[in-house]
Amino acid sequence: MNDPRQAFRPEADPQRIRAAFDAQLPTALRWRVSTAAERIARVKRLRDAMLAQREAFYAAFAQDYRKPPAEVEASEFLPVMDEIRHVLGNLKRWMRPRGVWPTAAMLGTRGAVQCQPRGRVLIIAPWNYPLGLCFGPLVSALAAGNTAIVKPSEMTPAVSALMARIVAEVFPENEVALFEGGQPTSQALLDLPFDHIFFTGSPAVGKIVMAAAARHLTSVTLELGGKSPTIVDASANLQQAAETLMWGKFINNGQTCVAPDHVYVHASVKAAFVDACRSVLQARYGAGAAAQKASPDLARVVNHRHAERVAGLLSDALARGANVLAGGEVDRNQCYVAPTLLDRIPAGAAILSEEIFGPLLPVIEYGELDDVIAEINTQPKPLALYVFSTNRRAVAKVLARTSSGGACVNHCVAQFAHGNLPFGGVNNSGIGSAHGEHGFKAFSHERAVLRATMLMTIKLFFPPYTKSRTRLIRAVVDMLRLPTL
Ligand code: NAD
């Protein structure tokens, strides 16, 4: 576990950053015409270098926050490898210009959408999935034909240093460069007129990134966070809900952007649900506080600052009268907070308003689904929403009446790994989307190309605007009122 003070690494030199940015311009112009085969070759080089360092990644993750190798595989390598596989299988098709039918007023033309690389892109990543959230977007950026500068988080220095080595090994700086550092390095990068910024992190820093991008009218994809609510209704399969939620909440020790933040449970099944959750936690991490603390399958909170923050949310809730249903142990020195379930949390507790981003799960009892929906709709739109239910009407109601970046029914977190689904937030939880073709498009400019055909109906609209021509134009406009087929 890192103490940011001990893990201090120097910030990147702004002049080096500027030099890499300038050097990427001729490459970006050349890469505008790069073929699918050339892009795939770059992605494969990255993949092979990443896989060659598999064991080194295990060690780096262990050093940064004791992340178990199985979770490194399942939540870092797997999404990136799946992204790469998806690119290899589909890139040619994604790159092909897509013809579109002319609309009524455009008869006599042929239209097509041509995806072009945006050019020089910047990727800023958070610490919680340091490999997946750097190399995942980088794969999409390369597939779309861009050069890239990548800024990983300063909070996971061992993983960042390893990624820096890999990038330097695979790419010259005029193609892809990686700069380690914190806020000053980010700021130096944000001063540059990139063609696109892909930022993953908190809503608060997302606003800073968007304001910086506005100075150059740079387009942005913002992958942010928030409090993702979960509903377990009276009809839910409680065992399935408990097994799935205890995984989604406690993988990566709760430090997951799409982790279920809090769970609304129908009063009639709350006791049974909590019992099922306790049994799952004991079976997975051991019975008793000491066994769970010794479990090799629980990652740690990333550093002392965040351990203090998570422990503070817990102690604030307890001081206000919340009740511990499971867990509750804290060892700040070891950045350890046990997998914890809480209930009876009074209004006003910070845990109910701040993104938890740690292994604490508030369990909130409810009576009427409408009240839960109304409460969700008073909050900023979350990144994810989960509903566990076998009642199709209830599920349809929740999906229709709420808004969130993504949603799962009887599942959680897994939507992140589905390459054919757009991954992203809405308003406070993000702008734009990533993964698969959606990620390719995030890093592409969809250029509209219109070709005139023989008919050249546009000639109708040329001056001089004689009376008859004006009548003709008016007749065309009137024709648009005719019913569609
Ligand atoms: P963060 O916003 O603090 O940092 C993200 C990146 O921004 C880091 O590289 C950091 O160095 C940089 N940064 C920090 N302060 C900055 C500033 N003032 N100016 C410019 N750059 C700055 O986020 P974090 O703590 O690393 O990650 C946790 C947050 O990220 C949570 O809110 C989580 O929900 C969100 N997140 C979202 C996704 C997603 O895909 N939507 C994925 C992971 C994490």
Image (spheres, rainbow, N blue to C red):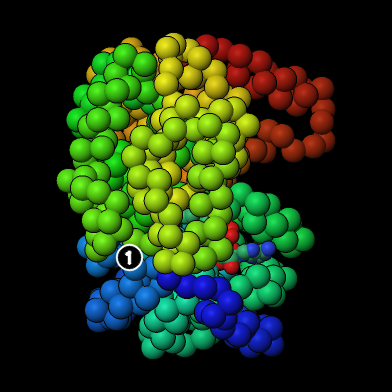
Residue with the mark numbered 1: 67
Question: Can residue 404 be spotted in the picture?
Answer: no
Residue 447 image position (x, y, % from top left): 55, 53
- 138 vs 268, left or right, is right
Residue at horizontal 50%, vertical 14%?
371
Question: Can residue 177 be spotted in the picture?
Answer: yes
Callout 1 amino acid: Lys
Quadrant of the rendering where the N terminus is positioned: bottom left
Residue 44 image position (x, y, % from top left): 29, 74
Residue 281 image position (x, y, % from top left): 25, 44
| Total marks placed | 1
- 221 vs 396, left or right, is right
Residue at horizontal 52%, vertical 38%?
318
- Quarter of the image for residue 17 reads bottom right
Residue nearest the viewer, comparing 474 with 368:
368
Residue 127 image position (x, y, % from top left): 48, 64
Residue nearest the viewer, comparing 161 with 280:
280
Residue nearest the viewer, comparing 176 with 222:
222
Residue at horizontal 51%, vertical 52%?
311
- Quarter of the image for residue 473 reads top right
Label 1 neighbour load within 10 Å: few <14, some 14-19, many 20+: many
For residue 23, above or below residue 319: below
For residue 466, above or below residue 368: below
For residue 303, above or below residue 200: below
Quadrant of the rendering where the C terminus is positioned: top left
Q: Quadrant of ligand 1?
A: bottom right
For residue 382, above or below residue 387: below
- Quarter of the image for residue 456 reads top right
Q: Is mark 1 within 8 Å of ligand 1?
A: no
Q: Secondary structure at mark 1?
A: loop
Residue nearest the viewer, comparing 142 with 239:
239
